[in-house]
Amino acid sequence: MTLRPELTQAAVPLIEEVEVVDEQGRVRAAYLPGERPLTVYLDKRELVTLMTLGGAPEHLVLGYLRNQRLVESIEDIAAVQVDWETESAAVTTRNGVDRIEERTARRVVTTGCGQGTVFGSLLDEVDNIRLPVGATLDQDTLYGIIDTIRLQQSVYKQAGSVHGCALFQGTELLMFIEDVGRHNAVDAIAGRMWLEGMTGSDKIFYTTGRLTSEMVIKGAQMGIPFLLSRSGVTQMGYQMARRVNLTLFARCTGKHFLLYTGRERFRHRLPEDAVA
């Protein structure tokens, strides 16, 4: 039997209604996405402060620990307790974390919205990642994912200023999470996958944000061979995708997309099946 951590249920409202004045002097309602600091303590050691919407704080913390490779197994975590009064998340492990000072000594500030960070040693481990070579994605499935995202209800449609990430199996939407930074949204999905024991080999990951090296590394760590975005790709994101052999799509809107890396996994429509 898998030991699962004890989790609080501390999700908070994602938007706030405020009064604004438009260009014609009319008073009306507008909506703001939440933005809250959440300081993570690992066995009483301050680790990082994350700026978050607060919609899935426990999953966010779990995913952060997983993607930073600070905790090896979900069974090693006894509890995650989020307290918004103190703006903190207290993580308790069952047996401590080996070499925690050494493993958190060097940080790299990334291009993530709100300034994401990765611990430097993580960048040295990417060559050990092995993604499934036999996984494939066809063009109709890609279009189905894009259309599902287009129809998805979201904080972004109400208030803007957030990024969304989604996990798919084929065209089935398994998870959709928004946050003020795309790195938080991907961590929250990673945390829920970790908690539920889900593998990434048959999954497809979608993000509204740009594909940086951090996003590629996190997707690869989750074992997901396909990464899609409606935005663009950075040079280092492209290089990292080639390095880990991840299939990378960007500018995914409507019937348009650009395939950058991992072409061997993609199945284009045959010319006679193309839609004019």
Image (cartoon, helix red, strand yellow):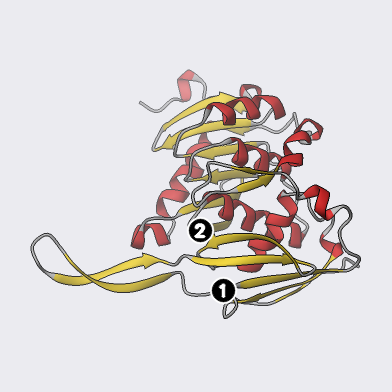
Residue 131 appears anywhere in the view = no
Residue 179, numbered circle: 2
Q: Residue at x 80, y 68 (%)?
A: 43
Q: Amino acid at mark 2?
A: Asp
Point out which mark residue 11 bears: 1
Q: What is the x, y in percent for residue 109?
A: 59, 44
Residue at far top of view: 271
Q: Disc 2 and disc 1: Cα gap in Å?
A: 12 Å
Residue 4, image quadrant:
bottom right
- Please tell me which residue lies in front, 274 or 36: 36
Q: Which element is circle 2 on?
A: strand
Q: 29 or 265: nearer the eye?
A: 29
Nearer to the camera, 131 or 241:
241
Amino acid residing under circle 1: Ala
Q: Measuring from the top left, give residue 10's x and y in whole percent.
A: 60, 76
Image point (86%, 63%), residue name: 76
Please report whichever mark, 2 or 1, sits nearer to the chain's N-terminal start: 1
- Residue found at the very far bottom of the displayed protein: 85
